[in-house]
Amino acid sequence: MEVKEFGAAGKPAVVLIHPSLVTWDYFEYVIPLLGEDYHLVVPVMPGYNLDDASEFSSVEKIASELDGWLLEHGIERLHAVYGCSMGGSIALRMAVYGKARAEHYIMDGGITPYRLPYLLTRPIALRDFLVVALGKLGGERLMAKAFSSTEFSEDDLRYAANILDHCSYRTLWRTFDSCNNYRMPKTPVRFDGEILYWYAEKERHARKWDIAYMRDLVPQTEFRELSGIDHGDMALFHPERLAQAIGNLRADCTE
């Protein structure tokens, strides 16, 4: 896994994990806003690295690899791990592993595993995969509309088309399958760090199952609704808002 670093190594560390269907530069507007105060660690998810032919593996494997990278580089404590959508799934799994411990784990519209028999999740994963596969075949406008009500510019759509052209069908399938079914403890669990679940006002209904999951199985979760935006909009369209929210997190909340 390729990892990009920004800011000063001596500053508190913040990991930024991008969603699916984008790459690390999803955070290009946020990095300059946080770089003076934090050591930023921005992994490039396998399968979404435009510079290699890697394939997405699984939420669990990537979370473990990222934890390993942090420990190898002497980063055992972090100020925050922020993940959006798929990135939120990886952030939650990092909290489960608890190797590189964070004061705050932030899931922004993070995807939680379905509490359904595995066979019943197949049609859901297939639906999401087919929508994205259509985008890969040239219908990126349909794909963008299916996942967000935000109006995307022509540049945004060209960016999406470039990402989809790079991603293999295997990466796309594994992304949705793993985010829907990654392993978590079966009974309620508490973590040392603060668990924050943020969701956009316009995705409130779409995140209903995820919110219920976090309430039931991670009872320490603090919830926050982000007014006036849709899924994944913070880093792209409101970077100052995201940087301020991360900067406002209280320090030293871990035991």
Image (spheres, rainbow, N blue to C red):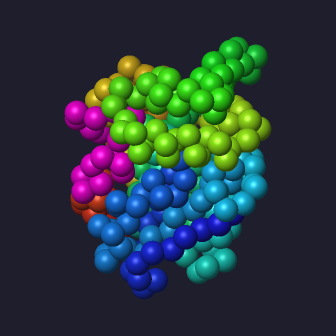
Location of residue 13 with respect to 97 vertically, above or below: below
**Measured along the vertical axis of the image, is residue 77 above or below residue 172?**
below
> Quick one: 131 or 207, which is closer to the camera?
131
Q: Can you give x and y, in whole percent of width and height, for residue 139 in the image? A: 56, 26
Residue 70 highlighted magenta (yes or no): no
| Coordinates of residue 216 in the picture (x, y in percent) | 48, 29
Q: Nearer the viewer, residue 104 or 109?
A: 109
What residue is at 40 percent from the left and 53 percent from the top? 194
Give the image location of residue 134, x and y in percent: 62, 25
Residue visible at 63% across and 74% down? Answer: 71
Q: Is residue 58 left or right of residue 8?
A: right
The one of 61 and 151 positioned closer to us in this rendering: 151
Q: Is residue 85 visible?
A: yes
Residue 232, image quadrant: top left
Say if residue 255 shows up in the picture.
no
* Relative height, residue 161 to residue 95 (above, below): above
* The N terminus sits in image quarter: bottom right
Which residue appears at 68% of the width and 54% of the height? 46
Q: Classify 59 as above or below 80.
A: above
Q: Which region is colored magenta?
A: 223-241
Residue 52 located left or right of residue 135: right
Point out the image quarter for the C terminus. bottom left
x and y percent of residue 123 in the render?
68, 15
The structure residue drawn at horizontal position 48% and vertical position 58%, both measured from the top left corner, is: 25
